[in-house]
Amino acid sequence: MIGSPRVHYSATDSTNERARLLAAAGAPHGTLVTADEQSAGRGRQGRAWTAPARSAVLMSVLLRELNETLPLAAAVAVCEALPVEAQIKWPNDVWIEGRKVAGILVEARPQEGWAVLGIGLNVTTEEFPAELNATSLHLEGADLSPEQALAALIDSLSGWLGQPSAAVLTAWRSRDALAGRSVRWSNGSNEGVAAGVDDSGALIVETVDGLVTLDAGEVHLER
Ligand code: BTN
């Protein structure tokens, strides 16, 4: 069961870090770690993740049943938990009207049989780092507390994390924010048009030299 047991911190370094320690200590599948505030929240690509206290859902769940589409399933689950229409920027940023509302960081040790799925969801957040084009749910008129948003997220994750890959891919593709749009990667040195994901979740891009697939990293939308 996703969300039980639950460990909540009023303040901690990173819920992903706490969940990793619980994994190493033998905590069960579904263990949830939440916090009001993080001092060392981690994002993808080695970035930091910051949010003012009690303004966001900051959660990590320990999973002992792994599959390749976990990062994509998590993004679909976040979208479906939201009260407004959301899209996914590959691989798993959740966007509302072109601005990021949630980020997902999966840290896995497949050889030890576990993964930590970390999600940061801006609920009433008003202050963002200058380099982030981010949004929050309350800007869209949704009257939600972080705890209510967490309950919706857990419910949605419980449904999506067990789904077969084909269902996850279909749902992910229907929310693809990049499809048909010009993107750049490798610090802007490569460019092409995004053409969806393959069955492993890798991004397909049409370039002047043909199709390429990107299985990790970051792409930037040309605005
Ligand atoms: C991203 O870069 O988009 C991923 C951000 C993930 C942030 C969440 S907040 C809760 C959990 N604990 C962390 O340290 N990171 C994730």
Image (cartoon, rainbow, N blue to C red):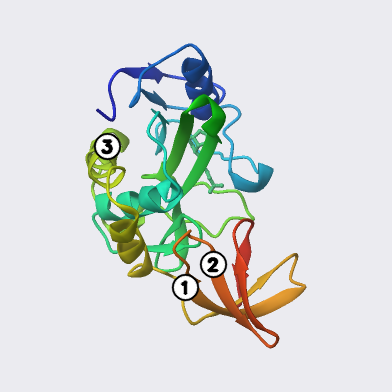
Whether ligand 1 has any atom under 8 Å from the Cβ at mark 2 is answered as no
> Which quarter shows the N terminus?
top left
Counting from the top left corner in percent of width and height, residue 216 is at 61, 56
- The amino acid type of the residue labelled 1 equals Gly
- Say what secondary structure mark 1 lies in: strand
- Helix, strand or loop at disc 3? helix
Q: Earlier in the sequence, mark 2 or mark 3?
A: 3
98, 64: nearer the viewer: 64
Pointer 3: what residue? 154
Mark 1–mark 2 CB contact (< 8 Å)? yes
* Residues marked 2 and 3 touching at CB (< 8 Å): no
Residue type at mark 3: give it.
Ile
- The one nearer the camera, 216 or 84, is 216
Drawn side of residue 213 relative to residue 115, left or right: right
- For discs 2 and 3, the disc positioned in front in the rendered view: 2
Q: Secondary structure at mark 2?
A: strand
- Quickly name the residue at label 1: 196
Q: Nearer the viewer, mark 3 or mark 1?
A: 1
**Which residue carries the number 2 mark?**
203
Give the image quarter of residue 56.
top left
Vertical side of 187 occupied by 79: above or below:
above
